[in-house]
Image (tube, rainbow, N blue to C red):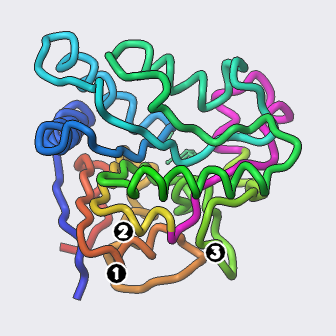
Amino acid sequence: MINLNKIICNNYIEMSRYAAQIIAKQIKVRPSAVLGLATGSTPVGTYHELIKMNRAGKLDFSKITTFNLDEYYRIEKHNPQSYHYFMHKHLFSHININSGSIHIPDGDVDCADEECRRYDCMIEQAGGIDLQILGLGANGHIGFNEPSSALFSNTHLTPLTIETIQANSRFFANIDDVPKYAITMGMSSILQAKKILLLITGSSKAKIAAEIFKGRITTDIPATLLQLHPDITVIMDREAASCIAQ
Ligand code: GLP
């Protein structure tokens, strides 16, 4: 019995609006909500819709807390390729969020293990994540939980696969500039969120997206583990949904 609530939208803009409405509803129900946030191009449209709601005075971010899924290692926060920079550019600097309530793993520390433990403690102290936003990696990764024979439960340092380095090289001048490691929340940390929203867009994700709906769970496709979550909504556009058996 597959537990996924599936919403298929006509296009990327519709998907982004739908996702933003769900996030807005969560913040209205609980103004001090703890949100888990994702990077990548997929959620940019959703963040744009949230910014519009905030500017129109319809959504207040002043009490929320955020935890991002991941950050490259090793990278400085002010580097334009860092996820710190990305999140400020696409969301945080446009909304009325308290800067002390923003959490992103620090990818510029000597001891990554210590940073991972600190990050897990902060999530726990915040009372866990109410709503986790996710994108889908081209190889089925979630956050930077890469396909492997075994997955980690908590926040950890991980090598990136060649597929991910290639996929993410589009944001860098040169593929050699893409960091080879990242700090990422683990699958258990992600699955502990009370609600999950998975966004998938475009035909290039269609085949890997279909794997999530087959009832098979494998660490070779980390996103298939999401089927274990009791409250997950997958919002996709028609192109991304084109390989799902009807
Ligand atoms: C990165 C991030 C993931 C994201 C993925 C997909 O690797 N670590 O969290 O889901 O990219 O990115 P995009 O949305 O650009 O396809």
At a point 46% along the width and 34% down the height, the residue shown is 41
Left or right side of 182 for 224: left
Q: CA distance from mark 2 to mark 1?
A: 7 Å
Q: Is residue 9 magenta?
A: no
Disc 2 is placed on an element classified as helix
Binning the other alpha carbons within 10 Å of mark 2 as few (below 14), some (14 to 19) or many (20 upward) gives: some
Above or below, 203 against 14 in this view is: below
Q: Is residue 182 magenta?
A: yes
Above or below, 206 against 29 in this view is: below
**Residue 105 on image: x %, y %:** 64, 42
Residue 210 marker:
2
Q: Nearer the viewer, residue 125 or 228?
A: 125
Mark 3 or mark 2, which has the lower sequence index?
3
Residue 20 marker:
none
What span is in magenta?
A: 166-188
Above or below, 140 against 10 in this view is: below
Question: Are discs 2 and 1 less than 8 Å apart at CB?
Answer: yes
At a point 33% along the width and 74% down the height, the residue shown is 229
At a point 32% along the width and 16% down the height, the residue shown is 96
To which residue does mark 3 refer?
A: 151
Q: Amino acid at mark 2?
A: Ala
Disc 1 is placed on an element classified as loop
Q: Amino acid at mark 1?
A: Lys
* 3 vs 2, front mark: 3
Residue 214 marker:
1
Binning the other alpha carbons within 10 Å of mark 3 as few (below 14), some (14 to 19) or many (20 upward) gives: some
Disc 3 is placed on an element classified as loop
Left or right side of 110 for 138: left
